[in-house]
Image (cartoon, rainbow, N blue to C red):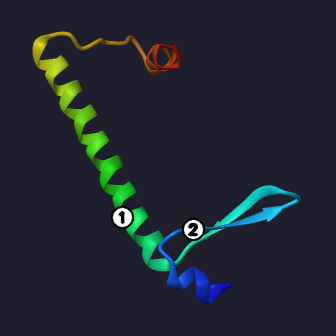
Amino acid sequence: MIDEVQASDEPTIVLQRSRKAAYILNPDRYERDQAELRLLRRGLFLAEVREAEAEYRAGDAQSFANVEALIDELRR
């Protein structure tokens, strides 16, 4: 099974009682996927920072009296 996983770029699904229990994939694919995910997360973070900076420059940024008020707003 390990030889098949290493030879393929596609994950292998492990079933337990006819339900997906795990995925096994070759390390190169895993590392590629993780690197891509890191880049996507960084891109999203930077886009959110740029958006917040633009709101601040435009005077549209919200201000909060305290951290609890901010947390309440984020939960909405």
Looking at the image, which is closer to me, 45 or 13? 13
Q: Nearer the viewer, mark 1 or mark 2?
A: 2
What residue appears at the point 39 percent right and 55 percent down from the top-left corner? 37
Report x, y in % for residue 47.
23, 36
Which numbered disc, 1 or 2, marks the residue that appears first in the sequence? 2
Q: Amino acid at mark 1?
A: Ala
Q: Amino acid at mark 2?
A: Pro
Q: Is residue 42 above or below residue 6?
A: above
Query: Which quadrant would residue 54 be assigned to in this image?
Result: top left
Query: Which quadrant would residue 31 be assigned to in this image?
Result: bottom left
Report x, y in % for residue 12.
63, 69
**Marks 1 and 2, how far apart in space?**
17 Å
How busy is the neighbourhood of tag 1: few (under 14 within 10 Å), some, or many (20 plus)?
Answer: few
Report x, y in % for residue 49.
24, 34
Q: Which residue is mark 1?
A: 35
Report x, y in % for residue 65.
39, 11
Q: Secondary structure at mark 2?
A: loop
Looking at the image, which is closer to me, 46 or 73? 46
Looking at the image, which is closer to me, 10 or 41? 10
Q: On residue 72, which mark appears? A: none
Q: Which residue is mark 2?
A: 11
The residue most toward the left is: 57
Asked whether, in this view, residue 45 is left or right of residue 50, the answer is: right
From the image, which quarter does the N terminus lie in?
A: bottom right
Query: Which quadrant would residue 48 be assigned to in this image?
Result: top left
What residue appears at the point 30 percent right and 41 percent down from the top-left corner? 45
Asked whether, in this view, residue 34 is left or right of residue 22, the answer is: left
Q: Secondary structure at mark 1?
A: helix
